[in-house]
Amino acid sequence: MTQHYHGTPITPRKVLAQLRGRSFCISFARPDDVEWCHENGQSNMLDNSAFSIWTENMKRKARGEAIVEMDGTFWQGFYAWAERWLTYKTTWAVIPDAIMGDVSANDALIAQWPHGQRGAPVWHMHEPLDRLKRLCDEWERVCIGSSAQFRVVGAANWHHRMTEAMNAICQTGRVPNWLHMLRGMNAARWGYPFSSVDSTDIARNHNRKNNPREMAEIWDGIQCSPFWDRKYVQADLLCAA
């Protein structure tokens, strides 16, 4: 089954209360609901907040404002915050990552992670496929992040790259480990073998869509296959010609 993590904070609290028993994603940047989610949720993921802070920093730069530095001090705070909640065996964390960093920068952040397999590294879609394969060999759970030219989830080049990635790691048809698609709730519909996905759809849209319980039921009912049927991409067709 595919695990669906609903992004928080979800306000007001009476709305969140309607989702008791669901799974949640709690960001280090907005930990408002972390205690409630552990008292009432089924499973929780702790987001390192790199993407949200990176996005906010882009806005700050445009306005000429000081940016938030995600340095060693910042990540030490994340490690300490995560440690308490990782006591729950159904909770796991996204290992710190540099959204637009190179492979060496992201590997260095993984090397500093103090909580072992209770975390999952991020493979960014603009990074080499060899790195994805290496992460899958070393980690029980791997996150996939849409980045750089592949930052728009669902765009044509995004699908092309995701197909390349799945072809690379699922050569026998079986998925080698737990794959989590970041910002990928909608991507669960598209035939990729994700074990889990997350989204802030309910947090952002519950006031103008269906009620939150109905929204969660729809999302949680979308299941991915545990298998991958190899699909040809342009490079395969050129080689076969």
Image (cartoon, helix red, strand yellow):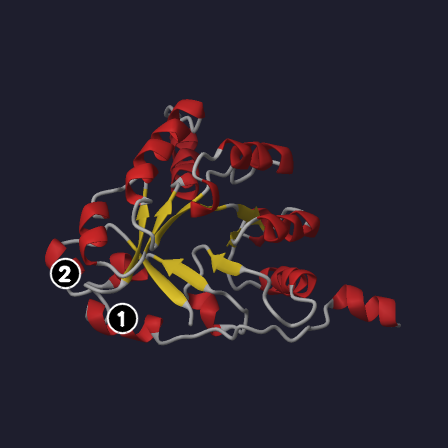
Badge 2: few (under 14), some or many (20 or more) residues near its Cα, within 10 Å?
A: some
- Taking the spot 42% from the left edge, 61% from the top edge, the residue there is 197
Amino acid type, residue under disc 2 in the picture: Ala
Amino acid type, residue under disc 1 in the picture: Met
Whether residue 68 is visible here, answered yes or no, is no
Instruction: Identify which residue, 81 or 26, lies in the foreground.
Output: 81
Whether residue 223 is visible here, answered yes or no, is yes
- Taking the spot 58% from the left edge, 53% from the top edge, the residue there is 150
Tell me the distance, in whole angstroms, between the alpha carbons under discs 1 and 2. Answer: 14 Å
Q: Position of residue 33 (x, y in %)?
A: 21, 48
Q: Secondary structure at mark 2?
A: helix
| Quadrant position of the N terminus in the picture | bottom left
Q: Secondary structure at mark 1?
A: helix
- Taking the spot 64% from the left edge, 46% from the top edge, the residue there is 127
Q: Is residue 186 left or right of residue 207?
A: right
Q: Quick check: 146 above or below 62? A: below
Q: Is residue 73 left or right of residue 32?
A: right
Q: Is residue 20 left or right of residue 168?
A: left
Q: Quadrant of residue 58?
A: top left
If you read the primary sequence from the N terminus, does the residue marked by circle 1 or circle 2 appear first? 2
Q: Quadrant of residue 196?
A: bottom left
Please tell me whether mark 1 or mark 2 is closer to you in this view: 2
Q: Position of residue 203 (x, y in %)?
A: 26, 57
Question: Mark 2 sits on what residue?
Answer: 17
Q: Position of residue 101 (x, y in %)?
A: 57, 36
- Taking the spot 68% from the left edge, 73% from the top edge, the residue there is 230
Cβ atoms under marks 1 and 2 closer than 8 Å: no
Marks counted in the figure total 2
Question: Mark 1 sits on what residue?
Answer: 215
Q: Which residue extends farthest right?
A: 241
